[in-house]
Image (spheres, helix red, strand yellow):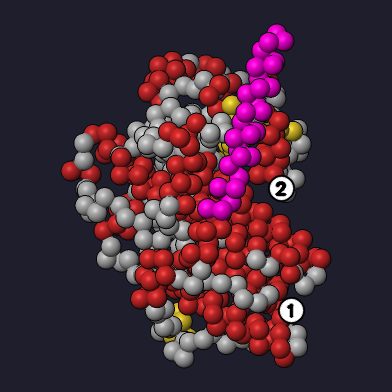
Amino acid sequence: MSSPESSPYKDTKASIHEETRKTEWPLWEIFIRGQHGLSHRHVGSLHAADAEMAIKNARDVYTRRNEGVSIWAVEAADIAASSPEEKGALYEPSNDKVYRHPTFFNIPDDVGAM
Amino acid sequence: MYAQMIKSTGQGVKSLDEMEPQERAFQERIDAGGKIEPKDWMPEGYRKNLIRQIGQHAHSEIVGQLPEGNWITRAPTLERKAILLAKVQDEAGHGLYLYCAAETLGVTRDDLTRDLLSGKMKYSSIFNYPTLTWADMGAVGWLVDGAAIMNQVPLQRTSYGPYARAMVRICKEESFHQRQGYDIMMKMANGTEAQRKMAQDALNRFWYPSLMMFGPSDAESVHSAQSMAWKIKMNTNDELRQKFVDQTVPQAEYLGLTVPDENLKWNEETGHYDFSEPDWNEFFDVLKGNGPCNTERLEARNKAWDEGRWVREGLLAHAAKKRSAKLAAE
């Protein structure tokens, strides 16, 4: 499955075939809500000329066995994604804030469930 | 397998000490069972190898629709027809899951398609054999999909995240394919004398080509050693072939059919079946393009691509028109 980081044309190395590139349908990322009241989840990508076709194709490619009750299609080029290099700056600040987790606090057994 | 004879850098596997820090961190992550995701740093060889492997696997799924598509209009009952149609549709889906995984590596769908159509990229040798009778639908599902499962189940643990996730989806669906094939074989093998003969004939023709799907022995191959270090190949070809034979022979016995190999016998000592190697000259010849159906398969794909061009372009033009109309209205 593709990921939201993938982009249809950017950083493409094998770009010696300009003629076909022009006619390639854009890449769409597909999100599906399963049947258990969960949020939409990324399942993969596909190519389609427009949003309507992206939804129809998503139905055929990703829900052949009742995998979903709702489909979102987003053009891959419209997705902003963090990059792996930013990992430190983005997530490290939360490492030293252990008090955000309830287990940081010791509550005596006598107090009961909390 | 569905990806055969994938060549890596050919330079042999570097030890951790020989690697630059970035590559060492990459290899250590794989060794620890971590996943590599699309935007992560990766050696160029890893990226190229994966594009070739996933691309070839995707092409196999797509071309693999042809031998079975051959029988959709002639399925013996409406139920069999609906089942076969669903199976062939799944193969298209599997091809699409794999193309998307390949696309995360910086190649486009059209690049891959073009390389298939020009013959630059290969697909599995198995799909260059014809499907002559209805029993072949049984043999293909049972043997060909059965062999594919052997390879695909371990690939669910492969190091490249998008590839592993595609494999999880594929494996879920693949077991339906094998069972529907075996179900056809059971019906035929227990049917009239003519049907039983047809089933035996299908097994005779598909046995060795199925064994070839795993590729020649690669215990000594530097390409395979590198792929295994990168965890984009999980077992040697011989391991998987042996596993397939061990699993399949009892299934053939249950059907009352004979595996076409005089040397096939249970080896008490090894706990495995001994069996004959397929004719590897035939395998290389089919890969080179000289199999019974190579020309026909590529022609069919090229025809579909060429004749679909006006549809692809027309729908794109329509989408552009709708978009500009919407912009004008805003």
Magenta span includes B329: yes
Q: Main secondary structure of the magenta part?
A: helix
Q: Is residue B326 above or below residue B146?
A: above
- Residue B309 percent coordinates (x, y): 58, 42
Q: Quadrant of the C terminus of chain A?
A: top right
Q: Is residue B130 left or right of residue B81?
A: left
Question: Quadrant of the rendered structure where residue B106 is?
Answer: top left
- Depth check: B236 or B101 in front? B101
How many marks the image carries: the answer is 2
Image point 22% across, 48% down: which residue? B14
What distance separates the C-alpha of mark 1 from that of mark 2?
27 Å
Residue A105 to residue A24: above or below: above
Q: Amino acid at mark 2?
A: Arg
- Residue A78, given in percent of the width and then of the height, sits at 56, 21
In the picture, measured across the screen, residue B144 lies left or right of residue B239, that is: right
The residue sitting at 40% across, 20% down in the picture is A86
Q: Residue at x 46, y 58 (%)?
A: B123
Secondary structure beneath dot 1 equals helix
Q: Where's residue B68, x and y in %?
A: 63, 65
Q: Which residues are magenta?
A: B302-330
Q: With B21 as the anchor, is B270 left or right in this view?
A: right
Where is mark 2, residue-wise?
A64
Q: Which residue is mark 1?
A: B187
A22 or B193: nearer the viewer: A22
The amino acid type, in three-letter code, at marker 1 is: Lys
* Residue B330 visible in the snapshot: yes
| Residue for point 77% across, 61% down | B82
Name the element at disc 2: loop
Residue B54 lies, with reference to residue A45, above or below; the image says below
Identity of the residue furthest to the top in this view: B330
In the displayed structure image, the side of residue B266 where residue B28 appears, left or right: left
**Residue A91 against residue B16 in the figure, above or below:** above
